[in-house]
Image (spheres, helix red, strand yellow):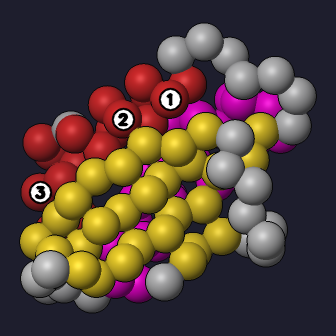
Amino acid sequence: MLHARRVPVRWDVEARAVFPDGARGRLAAQVRQDMWRALRRLRGFAPAVEVVRRDGALHLRAGGQVAGSVPPGTVERIADLLTSRAHRARWVRGAR
């Protein structure tokens, strides 16, 4: 399941995480929305989230395309978002 506006997706930046099984579409939409909010000032950013169900879990890749150079720390900001306890709890609840 891919949630993006621009297809095909160019993965200039990405981070990965694993979540409990649930609704892939809901999880992807929530993560993409929060990632967009966190990186909205990143010029030319086109967020994308891919969720694959494998081994009883949801494997998520978040990131997307950046027009121009990627500022230092961008990947870390996405990874921090994916490991945020508050965000993860809300996303898991929404994906049930």
Q: Name the residue under label 1.
A: 75
- Out of 52 and 24, give the one closest to the viewer: 52
Q: Which of marks 1 and 3 is nearer the N terminus?
A: 1
Looking at the rendered image, the disc whose residue lies closer to the viewer, 3 or 2, is: 2
Kind of residue at badge 2: Ala
3 and 2 marks in contact (CB < 8 Å): no
Q: Residue 79: give its label.
A: 2
Magenta segment includes 44: yes
Helix, strand or loop for disc 1: helix
| Other residues around mark 3 within 10 Å, as few (<14) / some (14–19) / many (≥20) | few
Report the disc number at residue 37.
none
Residue at 11% over, 82% down: 56
Amino acid type at mark 1: Val
Helix, strand or loop for the magenta stretch, by majority: helix
In the rendered view, does 54 fall on the left or right side of 35?
left
Give me the disc on residue 89: 3
Mark 1 or mark 3, whichever is nearer to me: 1
Judge the density around disc 2: few (<14), some (14-19), many (≥20) Cα neighbours within 10 Å: some
Instruction: Work out whether residue 21 or residue 91 is closer to the camera in this orientation and state it.
Output: 21
Which label's residue is closer to the chain start, 3 or 2? 2
Residues at discs 1 and 3 in contact (Cβ within 8 Å): no
Magenta residues, as a range? 24-47
Secondary element under disc 3, as helix, strand or loop, is helix
Residue 84 position in % (x across, y down):
21, 38
Q: Is residue 7 visible?
A: yes
Q: Distance between the residues labelled 2 and 1?
A: 6 Å
Instruction: Look at the numbered disc 2 and give the secondary structure of its residue.
Output: helix
Give the answer, above or below, for where 72 lies relative to 22.
above
The residue located at (60%, 61%) in the rendering is 48
From the top left corner, tell me how far across and down residue 91 is, in percent: 23, 64
Farthest residue to the front: give it: 55
